[in-house]
Image: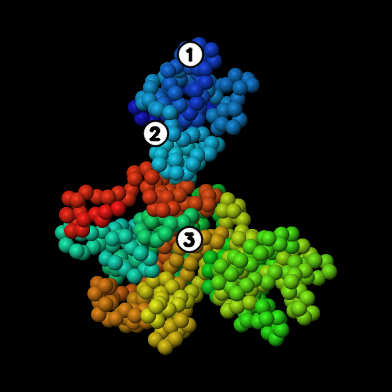
Amino acid sequence: MSEFEATSLRDALCGTLGPSDVGRRVSVCGWVARRREHGEHLAFLDLRDRSGIVQAVVAGTLEVRNEYVVRVTGTVAPRPEGTRNERLATGAVELTDCEVEVLAESEPTPLPLDEHAEADEAVRLKYRYLDLRREPMQSHLRLRARVNAALRAAMDAQGFVEVETPLLWAPTPEGAREFVVPSRLHDGEFYSLPQSPQIAKQLLMVGGFDRYYQIARCLRDEDLRADRQFEFTQLDLEASFVTQEDVRRFVSRAVLDAAEVATGERPGAIAEMTWAEALDRYGTDKPDLRFEMALADLTAAFATTGVRALQAPCVKALRVPGGASLSRSRLDQLVERARALGARGLAWFRVGPDGLDAPLAKVLSPDEAAAVAGVDGAGPGDLVLAVADAHALACRVLGALRVELGAPPVSAGPHRYVWVVDFPMFEGLDEEGNPVAAHHPFTMPHPEDLDRLGSDPLSVRAQSYDLVLNGWELGSGSVRVHRPDIQREVFRSLGISDEEAEYRFGFLLGAFRYGAPPHAGFAFGIDRLVAIFAGVENIREVIAFPKTQSGADLMTGAPKVISERQRRDLHLGPVRPA
């Protein structure tokens, strides 16, 4: 905890008092966490502030209830023998000869504030200002503050300058829906709230700020889930005259510094793999490396198979340690799950001491059975799952099952980081046959693939890279396009005409005509990083005022209908009837 500076009302924090303070007369302020009376002439108060709890012994009657805000002035004394509380940091001492001043009264709270009591999440979000008093929320947000401080220190130490970029911006095609703000002064026109400071930070590179960073607030109108909110915070950075290896080094230092502050231990060097390797071995571009269960390729073993269910361009397999004990109903659920993910089906094989036990086991050739039984060193008691389909689909289906069957909870260690590099430039075609950018349209193609940008865009690799931690994508980055000719060619590949590009991005393309340096950058989500450090499954637990899964703010009631006058000022039509 940072050093405490006394104020007019208090000269100590509750949770910092200990044996070295015995005999000291102190004033502390906080909330009454618990009140206990011993007869008519003695009362005990557990007083809580941001640092913890201390017990105060008060003579006489005391007209206070839980969550009253009080100031207690007393003398620090050792607790009597046999009354020490080893569960409290202050459990060896108490305040005696106390004077109590009530600063504010409290009604009974609508949710329990004891850290061990459970409360419905909807109630917690409605009364978030009370929920924030609970020790877990205090701990999470203070952890977040320490992580932010470590990130800033790391960026400052590497010569980056912090610059705030606008929240009212122009629309950009970054793959997600944007929130828009109607303009009062410009009838029928709108600002866009930034999905990221992407274009702004590229313009900073043109402006000569060759190392920029920002702890940036960003907004995306996407469906919410455990690791996604409308509003999110990211460490955003950009640098000139660098390669992607340089950027990964900058980011690695910042992340590892934050991890050391958060956990007390500094992780080792961050591993690296290509996107193609991640997909082939783990079935995903955000692999969780805390557990093994790598995918095996059985395509060669089944190249001439007569088993129709396993005839496909690719056959991938997954060993599930101890999975032979799964019930038949559970295996049927896995088959349905694989189909829901797009596979034609899922073959399963129990490995026993005498061979394979499965519906398909009888029709496999000896070589095919041996290949299945040998997947990833399988032995008796294991289960082997197999998917025969197109390579990418087979990998992704088994990758999803790998996570469902083997991934430890978020709270389980260790922290395993990995850089995933060499992503595809495009991830498919839209309804009009135009390629869809895998990251954003300002990513530089791989130099070896530039000549295929117009003729075979889906084979082009991007100079892009993701940072993954325990199966969570923390963030993405890339080398940027800094040449107008290449940027226009990328736009054309996406179906954006020169005229549309000029209308939407003329200020960026114009800037590139005045000496744009080669540059690259990155951004990663602080909400997700802190959630993993805190060991929680949902980023709402590390955000002060989050939205619900439906995007509602239960505390303020937002979103709300605005007045007719506001709608007229903003040139909006009348409210539609319900």
Say what amino acid the circle numbered 3 marks.
Leu
555 up-or-down from 395: above or below: above
Image coords of residue 327 (percent x, y): 71, 59
Per the image, the residue denoted by label 2 is 5
Which residue lies at the image location 45% right of the left edge and 20% below the top edge?
74
Q: What's the CA distance linking mark 2 and mark 1?
A: 29 Å
263 up-or-down from 59: above or below: below
Per the image, the residue denoted by label 3 is 474
Can residue 2 be seen here? no
Q: Residue furthest right?
A: 354
Q: Is residue 61 rendered to the left or right of residue 104?
A: right
Can residue 124 be seen here? yes
3 vs 2, front mark: 3
Q: What's the CA distance linking mark 3 and mark 1?
A: 54 Å
Say if mark 3 contacts mark 2, CB within 8 Å.
no
Colour mode of the rendering? rainbow
Mark 3 or mark 2, earlier in chain = 2
Q: Is residue 393 rendered to the left or right of residue 379?
A: left
The quarter of the displayed image where residue 572 is located: bottom left
Which residue lies at the image location 43% right of the left edge and 28% below the top edge?
108
Q: Under tag 2, what secondary structure?
A: loop
Per the image, the residue denoted by label 1 is 59
Say what amino acid the circle numbered 2 marks.
Glu
